[in-house]
Image (cartoon, rainbow, N blue to C red):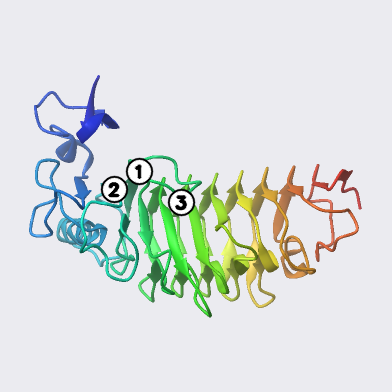
Amino acid sequence: MGLTHFPHGILATPNLGAGSGAYGPEPELFGGSTYYVDYEHGFDSNPGTIDEPVKQVNQAIALSNSERLAESKLSATDGALRRNRIFIKPFSTGASSTLYTGGTMGQYDPISTIPQHCDIIGTGQGVRSNGAGIVAIGSSTTSTTAMTIGSDGMRGVNWYNIQFRGGGTTTATVTCTGTVMRCGFYGCSFYSLPSTTALISATGHWAGNIMYRNLFAHNETSPCATYCFYFTTGVFTDNWFEENTFAWGSTALVSIGATSLSHGTVFYHNFFVSNGGTTDSFIDASVDGGAFLAENYFAGASSDALHRVVSNYDAGNIQGATLITD
């Protein structure tokens, strides 16, 4: 099985075809196409191929959505007959003096065109710290949202190795007012400016999503946000949170609102670190009976409030140096 490479030796996904193109006959076999984003060498008038990449992530998303819609003959958010891929190349802080005007160099524009049924992969360095070579979306200097998911929602999208930057006073880094369903964030980080409302703020439905090995509260100052993950209304169901780090939320690290319908969600092997405030370390009581907590670690003394009644659905959680048993 051959392998295909993004420029400069970045390993992508297996090439199942025998052709000389980036993916050979893969689109015909599996119903999906691949788009490439390269700020330094791309143009948004390009088709988004590996030889002619586009310049901005939003343009690649627009191409992917358009192709998928034309192929499926369905609405923009329905079905998954085509599942595309978008590879994003990082660019250096000195690449140009006329980059995204709302932020600093090395950052792509905030996401305004919401993807559907695709995989979006940052091909740079790991995003759990700042520095050159990472794929960053949004601004680390200006109060703005890195991604706003509106009424159309987002379905079937997986994000890999992306740093979302934004927030600021009364602003969230990622804002969701529509349904987010069957999506995943893998190895991503969420950066916030001081006084950010939440790193992820959701007021629509959040269902069937996977959050795996993400870093919430990526900031050099603390507390960076009121909440790390903040869900207030709608259906919160069948989600999986594993090996995430939640840190520096001044009110709560994770909050699931009392008006939400919550069930079938698992928090497993997550780390809840200092919250920068004097309130609860983890979650509000409204989620009792709707989520299962297993082998999570809560930093701080065992006397700190969790605002959650531990039930028979929970197992093996540690707070400070104490096993939570009642």
**On screen, residue 1 above or below 285:** above
Can residue 6 be seen here?
A: no
- Residue 24 is situated, as x and y percent measured from the top left of the image, at 13, 32
State how many labels appear: 3
- Disc 1 marks which amino acid? Gly
| Few, some or many residues within 10 Å of mark 3 (<14, 14–19, 20+) | many
**On screen, residue 277 above or below 323:** below
Q: Is residue 185 left or right of residue 232?
A: left
First in sequence: mark 3 or mark 1?
1
User: Dot 2: what SS?
Assistant: loop
For the residues bearing labels 2 and 1, Cβ distance under 8 angstroms? yes
Can residue 117 be seen here?
A: yes
**On screen, residue 245 above or below 278:** above
- Disc 3 marks which amino acid? Gly
User: Dot 1: what SS?
Assistant: loop
Front residue of 4 and 156: 4
User: Dot 3: what SS?
Assistant: strand
- Residue 37 is situated, as x and y percent measured from the top left of the image, at 22, 50
- Residue 201 is situated, as x and y percent measured from the top left of the image, at 53, 70
Res. 179 image quadrant: bottom left
Please give the label number shown on residue 92.
Answer: 2
Task: Quickly name the residue at label 3.
Answer: 184
Task: Quickly name the residue at label 1.
Answer: 133
**On screen, residue 16 above or below 41:** above
Q: Quadrant of the N terminus?
A: top left
Q: Which is more foreground, mark 3 or mark 1?
A: 1
